Image (tube, rainbow, N blue to C red):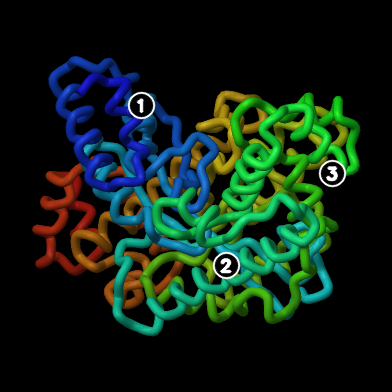
Amino acid sequence: MNTSTAEQNLSSFDPKVRQQALDALVAAWQAGEIPCAPPNDQLNLHCHTFFSYNGYGHSPSALAWLARKLGWYAVGTVDFDVLDAMQECLDACDRVQVRGMAGMETRAYLPQFATREINSPGEPGILYYMGVGFVYEKTLSPADEALADLRQRAAERNRDVVARVNAYLDPVVIDYDRDVLPLTPAGNATERHILLAYDIAARKHFPEREDLLRFWASRLEMDVAQVDAFMGDEPFPHDAIRSKLIKRGGVGYVQPGPDTFPPFDEVTDTIIKFRAIPTYAWLDGTSAGEQAIEELLALAVSKGVGAINIIPDRNWNIKNPDERALKIQKLYEVVQLAHDMDLPILVGTEMNKAGQKVVDDFDAEPLRPLHADFIAGAHFVYGHTVMERALRQGYQSEWALEYLPERRDRNAFYQEVGRLVLPGKAALARVAQLSDAREPQAILARLQEL
């Protein structure tokens, strides 16, 4: 199998094909047959995979290999409402010897902010919310049932969207089970899969391009020339179609309320039961909720939040100079607040849209002063992941609560573990041999000797 074929196969929907491809690439890399960039301090801890939607079609294995090939320090997966990527991510990162971690993103309802927008534009009380550092996917417990509920809620919302959009786009209609779910490897469709299905269906119904353009122009209330400018030759989840059909104000959109998404406390409880770390997902500081970020984070921390996630690119890479200056200021303010509140900072680009960066430009002037904080955040969640995998002594463990009751001390411990422990199965096995050590400082001393 040549390198190009193996890399393509990394994103096959067949897990056996992905495994064979990764085996071939790792063997070639270890034999010196594939050049990889030297290790560097690049990282992306917020990679959506094809288990929700990745703009480049990347599987967890493909992302791990990308990290190896580009020399990244760490990589982390985050998917909407599912942990389907978790085990593959951790295993693949072990194979390629890159610090790896797995997370999940969802939306929740926070009643204390019911009248204020938070980080979901136009949707007061609703917030994007994350858990990071997952290790165990199946617990056969109420937490597992709660995870299944998140998946089911998402599917029901999608079916409702399809029903409304079908009525508007008729004669171009789709069937959710027949046309949308096959576009996903594990049945967890997102709105971008729905858009892709509609584009495919429209091309089948209107095989002549002129007819296709006229159809979309009429439904989108745009000029044919405007549609022609963005409509390529291959099906794609176009933003213009997304805005008209699905996003706020679109024909398929329904304003969410208290019952649309699970309560914040319920989601937090689920994340903690999985022994992962509840994480607030910062937007850009301009919403009413995030303008009250001290109040918001104080409330979130009181309920169990232990970290904050930032998408750096949307906080500085902005054309309008006034908007750029404002959002950079807000970025620095929230980073300082995270320091003050002992909240590790996790960062990355989403890659849930084609064209997005695969990794942030940490050499950009606004990000350069913050890079050390971002590395520390990667150490923290990787250190937790290592300790949980090897010894069941992660951030939420009984051991951590007994020996490191203060969050500041707990954060410092896992950051140091993450710094000391190299990635890979061999290092993980050596950590597992420390089961006789109980005191945190004794564990760190032993790790320094490994």
Under mark 3, the amino acid is Leu
Under mark 2, the amino acid is Ala
199 or 240: nearer the viewer: 199
Residue 208: image tag: none
Mark in front: 3 vs 1: 3
Q: Is any atom of residue 176 visible in this view?
A: yes
Q: Which residue is mark 1?
A: 71
228 or 391: nearer the viewer: 228
Mark closer to the chain start, 2 or 3 = 2
Residue 36, quarter of the rendered image: top left
Residue at image position (38%, 58%) is: 84
Which quadrant, please, contains the C terminus? Answer: top left
Q: Is any atom of residue 450 visible in this view?
A: no
Q: Position of residue 91 (x, y in %)?
A: 24, 48
403 or 434: nearer the viewer: 434
Mark in front: 2 vs 1: 2
Q: Which residue is mark 3?
A: 220
Q: Is residue 398 above or below residue 71?
A: below
**Mark 2 near mark 1, Cβ–Cβ under 8 Å?**
no
Residue 154: image tag: 2
Q: Give SS at disc 2.
A: helix
Q: Give SS at disc 1.
A: loop
392 or 166: nearer the viewer: 166
**Label 2 – label 3 distance at C-alpha:** 25 Å
Q: Position of residue 425 (x, y in %)?
A: 16, 46
Residue at image position (85%, 38%) is: 217
Mark 1 crowd level (few <14, some 14–19, many ≥20, 10 Å Cα): some
Under mark 1, the amino acid is Gly
